[in-house]
Amino acid sequence: MSVNYSELLRALLPEACLVVGALVVLGVDLIACRGRGQAVRMTAASLIGVVALVGAMFAVIMVGCGGPMFGGVLTLDPLTFATRLGVLGLALLTVAMCGDVVRLPNPAEYVAVLLFATTGFTLMAAAQQLLLAFLALELASLSLYVLAGFDKSRRESAEAALKYFLFGGISAAFLLFGFSLIYGLTGSIELLEISRQIGTQPASTLLVVALVMILVGFGYKAAAAPFHLWAPDVYQGAPASSAALIASASKLAGFTLFVRLLWGGFGAAPGHSSMPSWLPVVAIIAAVSLVLGNVAALAQSNVRRLLAYSAIGHAGGLLLGVMVAGRAGPGPLFYYAVTYGLAAVGAFGVIAVVDRAGSCQNITDLAGLHRRSPLLAGCLAIFVLSLAGIPPLAGFFGKFIVFAEALKSGGLATSTGWLALLAIAMSAVALYYYLLILKQALVAPPAGSAARLKVPADAGIVLVVTALLLLLLGLSPSIVLQLLSRTT
């Protein structure tokens, strides 16, 4: 394979911007900001992080869609283009509102690790080979483990990081073992060649074992039931901005890689041509995630754990998007993941602001928010209603597009059909616990004195922009969907 390094550097220009940005963050903090206050250090680190992310977004637009690169190791197709922009945008919102880490002793290191995690996400979006996919996934995962346990002053944060690391290590072992079996069966680690080889081979038990291993590994990464046990503790113990990144950009990049792997590499696995052999297994995981996530959320009094179980339920809906991607393309899945990510970032942004003024763990800590800060209460209402799928917000159309495509793909007699009906029923269940949050924030009186909350300017701007984006994308979904039609 002849290597054109200038072509490779151009293809990886967004990742280069992120890595350079992370190194600049560390260098500036070490040279110019080490003796200054935490607020100054956090402001400097955040500004450099924002510049790096904006630069990476411009680099994505410059690179465009060039097709397979570096001998087919990575691909720059419309899905890569859209996902890169999506994860960079979500990471940008996260960095801009990560004032909840001001009290931590190493704010520059926090932003640098966040940029490294985003580098892993963008590489996941472009991966067309098992080895690069695994390396990108582990770069992102190892960074997220650090971000989850960054608040060393709280035992819950350390516990969250340890559980996340242990579960993540187990999932990586399953995933790598499955990849190794696929390589042994096909003699290749490139997805297109794997698809060709699988399509010409008879069914084998070893292939089934490999697919099960891979599905288990991705089930852990996506917090899908029954592989979800790390998620509630991580969402509860991690800094709010870390939880926001895990819930948003991580899911978008992970499901993009998942759909590329399943349909691009294993879409021709033995079975009926219209129903790959892995489809029923994914349907079962999606159904369990929908039921367990939404039903378990009903019993939660901790708002972070409630959002974690909500994320498990949404993982079931996203898996339904993976199932219909073979017929409808990745557009519905991408739209759902982006709009869910925006709402999750916004919800955790509100939690971060309230947490800085005291504590925001229980749902009752949001009581009287409409008196303490009408801005936060209004933004939280938009985020929660979008998560619930209420029109005209983007969350409604994210669910609608996926459910409609599922019903169109074969009617109620197919696995996607009954799964769509189950998802609609669970959306009604989810509405109840989302309304519990809104009841506390918009109706209940404050628990004590109704002292007004001071909303930092950066956090306020991010929350307002995120809320407006949810409204705009709900009124005009084509803004996001057109990203996947880009060909130049």
Image (cartoon, helix red, strand yellow):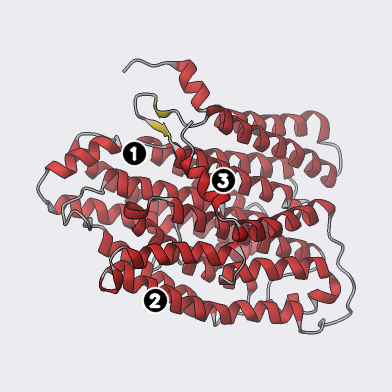
Asked which quadrant contains residue 290, the reply is bottom left
Examine the rendered structure and indicate whether residue 450 appears above or below residue 238. Answer: below
Q: Quadrant of residue 459?
A: bottom right
How many numbered marks appear? 3
Residue at 72%, 70% in the rendered image? 360
Quick one: 298 or 356, which is closer to the camera? 298
Kind of residue indicated by mark 1 = Leu
Mark closest to the chain's N terminus, 1 or 3: 3
Label 2 CA crowd tier, 10 Å (few <14, some 14–19, many 20+):
some
Residue at x 42%, y 76% (from the top left corner): 291
Give the residue drawn at x 29%, y 34%: 190
Q: Are marks 1 and 2 in contact (CB under 8 Å)?
A: no
Q: Amino acid type of disc 2?
A: Leu
Q: Residues within 10 Å of mark 1 (few under 14, many from 20)?
A: many
Is residue 110 or residue 327 the one in the foreground? 327
Q: Secondary structure at mark 2?
A: helix
Q: Nearer the viewer, residue 276 or 43?
A: 276
Disc 1 to disc 2, C-alpha distance: 33 Å
Q: Is residue 488 above or below residue 141?
A: above
Q: Can you tell which of label 2 and label 3 is closer to the viewer?
A: 2
| Mark linked to residue 422 | 2
Circle on res. 331? none
Q: Nearer the viewer, mark 1 or mark 3?
A: 3
Secondary structure at numbered mark 3: helix
Q: Which residue is mark 1?
A: 130
Quadrant for the N terminus in the image: top left
> Type of residue at label 3?
Val
Q: Answer yes or no: do the residues labelled 2 and 3 have beta carbons within 8 Å?
A: no
Side of 444 relative to 236 (left or right): right
Quick check: can you spot residue 152? no
| Location of mark 3 (residue) | 87
